[in-house]
Image (tube, helix red, strand yellow):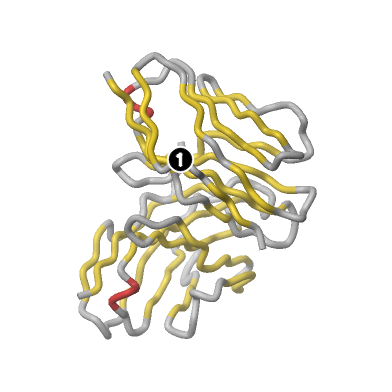
Amino acid sequence: AQTVTQSQPEMSVQEAETVTLSCTYDTSESDYYLFWYKQPPSRQMILVIRQEAYKQQNATENRFSVNFQKAAKSFSLKISDSQLGDAAMYFCAYRVNFGNEKLTFGTGTRLTIIP
Amino acid sequence: EPEVTQTPSHQVTQMGQEVILRCVPISNHLYFYWYRQILGQKVEFLVSFYNNEISEKSEIFDDQFSVERPDGSNFTLKIRSTKLEDSAMYFCASSTGTQETQYFGPGTRLLVL
């Protein structure tokens, strides 16, 4: 069974600084997707970034980028120039690329931005 | 930008009562999902739905749960006889395909007393 682990229940970062959130996963599949979702206090889950496992290039979306290490089964999220609006719960999620459509989520990391 | 909507945002019910949670997926999406998040815990998959059929369900999704697409826009989750442990945030999601990103609604917070 696939599992997703986020070992940092809470992180904090000074506004304008950079922070990295960790995620590891376990799977026997070779073709899958990885996601970071953000859940602000409003509780709506918002997609931050997505990575396809067959792509070696790390995904980037503006201030958000990932460090995808397939062999190590690691998928960390880097937030540059942190802003107050980045404060949220961040969930790492996994989905296999065929058949099984469900997302498997980690337990989340609560990110606090210090003004 | 199109988004998934859910109603109600909050619902309080008595144990044993039936509840129906409603979702309007993004209009050109064909795949629909329900997830739940018990307070303080991770988001868990409940069920996926395509072409008017359940395509996958988790062990959480027992006989007390059912899903339906009653018309061309709504997607509902029914809990027949609610239990205290059904108290959670329920998220609806939709996507254009099984390999595509799932977009989530804002959730319905269900409290069973």
- Of the residues shown, which amino acid type is indicated by label 1? Gln
Q: Position of residue A16 (x, y in %)?
A: 39, 14
In this figure, which residue is indicated by the disc labeled 1? A8
Left or right, B71 with reference to B85: right
Q: Residues within 10 Å of mark 1 (few under 14, many from 20)?
A: some
Left or right, B76 with reference to A102: left
Residue nearest the observer in this picture, B76 or B102: B102
Name the residue: 33% across, 64% down.
B88
Name the residue: 60% across, 73% down.
B54
Name the residue: 50% across, 33% down.
A21
Q: Is residue A16 above or below residue A56?
A: above
Q: Position of residue A9 (x, y in %)?
A: 41, 43
Residue nearest the observer in this picture, B62 or A114: A114
User: Quarter holding the C terminus of chain B?
Assistant: bottom left
Name the residue: 77% across, 48% down.
A31
Q: Is residue A38 above or below residue A77?
A: below
Left or right, A4 with reference to B98: left
Q: Position of residue B63 (x, y in %)?
A: 48, 85
In the rendered image, which quarter is residue B84 located in? bottom left
**Chain letter belonging to callout 1:** A
What is the secondary structure assignment of the residue under circle 1? loop
